[in-house]
Image: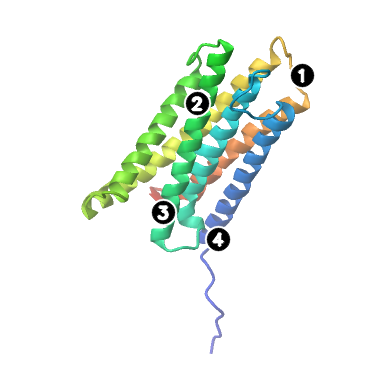
Amino acid sequence: MDMKGPASAPPSKKADARTTLVAHVLAAAAAALVLLWCVHFRGGLAFRSMANKQLIFNVHPVLMLLGPIVLGGEAILCYRSLPLARDARKKAHLALHAAGLAAGALGVYAVFKFHAESGIPNLYSLHSWVGIATISLYAIQWAVGFLAFFFPGASPATRRTALPWHAVAGLLVFVLAVGTAQLGFLEKLTFLQGPPLRLPKYGAEAMLVNFTALVVLLLGVAVVLATVTIDGTRYNTIM
């Protein structure tokens, strides 16, 4: 007579759980690194500053990373990581995305305010173009999801049809946010390494910025891998 122990989780589920954990760790690391950069190396954060306008700018990378990327990534992962009923996970998903969108909007406001008070033109770079497109798509995605799945809510048939598209569109917006962050880190570091600051190319701050960008990139990869299941022929979203 064979004696079998309790059934263990399938290997694929264990791998998914490990990927989700890695994504959480990378999200915390990215948040800590961008705060270290902006507070320790760049002098701090402020929405108002008469003496140092760069403090206003510093709000921008912090909120853009914490909002659409960290909170947005956690919103995507909460269906897998939160040990709650499905309805509670849906509400957490909505709330985390709302917080991420609000942080992103404040981050955009901060950089426009910095430009206005420093006499710098707006929307002159690829980073700014992609960034405005990304935050606009994020807002549209959230509004459509709210109307279709929360209030007033579409019919069950419409929700079933829209759900895969909603999940894929949300993941694409997240990937755009990660790509925009990469452009932003590159642009800011290029400015810092030019005159008048001439930041050392192999100095501690330059290495920190590059490492932060790498952690954000790996976070994006981890969230995507934790969200999709690849079986060789198709991609199945978990949402």
Q: What is the C-alpha distance between the residues marked 2 and 4? A: 41 Å
The mark nearer the N terminus, 4 or 1, is: 4
Q: Are marks 2 and 4 in contact (CB under 8 Å)?
A: no
In the depicted view, which residue is nearer to us: 158 or 41? 41
Position of residue 88 relative to residue 236, above or below, is: below
Residue type at mark 4 is: Lys
Q: What is the C-alpha distance between the residues marked 4 and 1? A: 44 Å
Image x and y of residue 114, in percent: 56, 19
Residue that mark 2 sits on: 109
Residue type at mark 1 is: Pro
Residue type at mark 2 is: Tyr
2 vs 1, front mark: 2
Q: Are marks 4 and 1 in contact (CB under 8 Å)?
A: no
The mark nearer the N terminus, 2 or 4, is: 4
The mark nearer the N terminus, 3 or 4, is: 4
Give the class, few, some or many, for how many residues have Cα within 10 Å of label 3's Cα (few <14, many ≥20).
some
Q: In the structure shown, which secondary structural element does the residue marked by tag 3 occupy?
A: helix
Residue that mark 3 sits on: 91
Horizontally, residue 237 falls left or right of residue 211, namely left
The mark nearer the N terminus, 2 or 1, is: 2
Residue at 55 percent of width and 57 percent of height: 17
What number is the disc on residue 14? 4
Q: What is the C-alpha distance between the residues marked 3 and 4? A: 26 Å
The mark nearer the N terminus, 3 or 2, is: 3
Q: What is the C-alpha distance between the residues marked 3 and 2? A: 27 Å
Query: Residue 197's image quarter?
Result: top right
What number is the disc on residue 200? 1
Give the class, few, some or many, for how many residues have Cα within 10 Å of label 1's Cα (few <14, many ≥20).
few
Q: Are marks 2 and 1 in contact (CB under 8 Å)?
A: no
Q: In the structure shown, which secondary structural element does the residue marked by tag 2 occupy?
A: helix
